[in-house]
Image (spheres, rainbow, N blue to C red):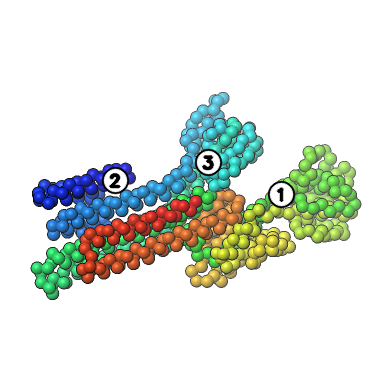
Amino acid sequence: MKTRLIRFIFSALIFIAALILSQHYFYPALVLFIIAYLCAGYDVIWNALRNIIRGKLFDENFLMSVATIGAFCISEYAEAVAVMLFFQLGELFQSHAVNKSRKSIASLMDIRPDYANKWENGEFVKTDPYDVNAGDLILVRPGEKIPLDGIIKEGNASLDTSALTGESVPREVGVGDTVLSGSINLNSILQIETTSEFGESTVNKILDLVENAGNKKSNAETFITKFSLVYTPIVVGCAVLLALIPPFFAGFDTFTFWLARALSFLVVSCPCALVISVPLSFFGGIGGASKKGILIKGGNYLEALAQADTIVWDKTGTLTKGTFVVKEINALTHSKDSLLFYAAYAEHYSPHPISASIQNAYGKEINENKIQNYKEISGFGVSAEIDGHEILAGNEKLMNQNQITFQKPELIGTIVYIAIDRTFAGSVVIGDEIKEDAATAVRSLKKYVSKQVMLTGDLDAVGQKTGSLLGLDEVYTQLLPTDKVSHVETLLGKLPRKKKLVFVGDGMNDAPVLARADIGIAMGALGSDVAIEAADIVIMTDEPSKLKDAIEISVKTHRIAMQNIIFALTVKIGILALIALGFANMWAAVFADVGVCVLAVLNAMRMLKSR
């Protein structure tokens, strides 16, 4: 851009000198006009010739070259140079806008690590991140970026994850915690065992996703490309007719007069404002979204989000935290502490998340010598002998199978019934917690969509209660992944014309539904291969409210793109008519073309404020 600016200033100064000399010295002035013209427009002429050779005849370079060379042929030297100068001015505005848009993603690009401190031959050696393998040990000092995903083996620290998630609050981590590449270590040395190579790391996936987002064009961008292919030949044909038909009736001595109008017609007909501003709007929208921790794979998905009519939510891990906690202990024959003791010991060897929640609630070290005859009964629960007592812990089916009479608790959730020596002793109610901003997200989205549905594999009572608390329109429960796809198919069939269905899941077991929906959004799935591959949009935090931000950015982007299309076409058609009727000349054409382009670009740049 700096080179272009210097060239523009140099050309403008020579042009001013040529205007002054033209009052008294024709040939020296002509030489300066030619120098100024070539300095300002050599790249335009070269691109036009190159595109003609490649078979791309009608583009803005061709229009500008024909119009300005034609102006020289009819001795309109000042107008020819002015056209090129103002065209370059428009290009300067475009370059500034694109650079500003790229800078909006620049901080995201800064997450790329420059090196990794890898353990080799008894010491940590600075090396390229690509040379680190999964399972290697790396050292991350305060102020350094974590170069690869891994698990902390030694140390505790605060991590700045703002470049990944858009959140400013540092994350506290310690031994055993998983950390993601791209985070910045703020205050303490960490030793990390890597879990992936750099090519498969979170930071590399994010960078690749953002860098390639522009390859998937929105309908508006595709429309402009197709429109230009039809529009440009038409205006060139109209310009030729404008130069030839009137002289045929009015006398060919007026040919120069009508040729000047035709050349002005060509100048104003350039579709620069559309070609530049519409893609810039979507590029800015994608950049603004990335700053909020929302990765959008292309302008087509950003545009489609503005047409969302139905949002389908997964429950566990999306609207809820996906972590089970003990909510209630109902003890009948023993104290609550005693019941929890037997439950924790009986469930100790089970890998199920329910077992983990009971262990966490118990909070004490388990003496495995007390556990005898442990047996896991698939689909029912577990049995074990604890301190000489037979313990059964599981669901209703386990109690019925052993002909044990039990009482159902009033609180809704996942229930573990416990029997001691074949006598019902009580129950433990375990539930998933709703995310803090889930209700706010559902409520705020009612402004943009007509229906919000939840699909879950959870029990009907649990799913219905969650849906009721959040204010969802429809809830479907006890679904397998294939059942979710079937429900989405049904909802797609009920959509109004040109409206879209959005599915929001945690990305781990929802890949089929993410792929089937019009727009698949992976929630809180940073680092998940399944999510990034299957989803069209990845929300890098666990916040459902980010979906509202994404839709707002989409709506604003679409609105600005449409404003630019309508504004540019209206002004151009009006000026073209004025030129054809003789109410405007080439100078007016130049100002109209550059003015429309600059205003459209400035309007598109408003998208950069989305963050």
Q: Which residue is disc 2 drawn over?
A: 4
Specify whether 53 is left or right of 363. Answer: left
Q: Residues within 10 Å of mark 2 (few under 14, many from 20)?
A: some
**In the image shown, does 75 or 541 lie closer to the viewer?**
75
SS class of the residue under badge 1? helix
Q: Name the mark on residue 120.
A: none
Residue pictured at 20% horizontal, 65% vertical: 262
Q: Tell me which amino acid carries mark 1.
A: Pro
Rendered location of residue 398, percent (x, y): 81, 56
Residue 596 occupies quadrant:
bottom left
The residue where tag 1 is placed is: 353
Residue type at mark 3: give it. Answer: Gly
Quadrant where the image shows the N terminus: top left
Mark 3 to mark 2: distance in Å? 35 Å
Q: Is residue 373 above or below residue 155?
A: below
- What residue does disc 3 label? 182
Residue 429, percent from left and from top:
78, 54
Give the Cα distance between marks 1 and 3: 29 Å
For this orientation, the residue located farthest to the bottom is 249
